[in-house]
Amino acid sequence: LGAVVDNQSMSLAGTDPDAVVSGSYVLAVVAGLFLCACAFVAFRCAVRRHAPGRAGRVLLIVAAVVHGVLAAVSLALL
C-alpha cells in the first residue's frame, strides 16, 4: 500500500500521502515483528517440549484470532 500511494501520490480520505506511506510501512514492520515473535514462541516450545507460558499463549491466541478475522474478511470480499 505504501508503494502504491507513494507512486501515485494519492490521498486516502483527505489524508496526507506521506502520512499514509509512513503509516503503512510502520504497520508492515509491526506485523513482521509480531509474526517473528509468534515464530520464536512456537520454535521455543517445540525445542523445549513444553507448553508456552501465559504471555506466549496470549501471543499465539491473538495471532490465531487475527488470522481468522483476516480470513473472514478476505472471504467476504470474494
Image (cartoon, rainbow, N blue to C red):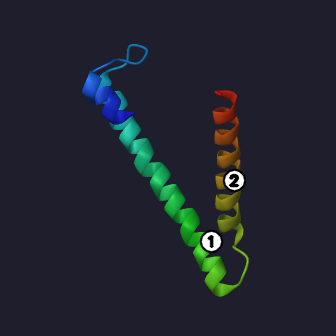
Residue at 58% in and 63% down: 38
Amino acid type assigned to the residue bearing label 1 in the image? Ala
44 above or below 77? Answer: below
Say which residue label 2 marks. 64
Residue at 60% in and 71% down: 41
How many numbered discs, if any? 2
Residue 46 located left or right of residue 17: right
Amino acid type assigned to the residue bearing label 2 in the image? Ala
Residue farthest along the front direction in this orientation: 78
Residue farthest along the bottom direction in this orientation: 48
Q: In the rendered image, which quarter is residue 54 located in? A: bottom right
Give the structural element (helix, strand or loop) at label 1: helix
**x, y (%) of residue 7?**
26, 28
Sequence-wise, the earlier of marks 1 and 2 is: 1
13 above or below 32? Answer: above
Q: Nearer the viewer, residue 75 or 38?
A: 75
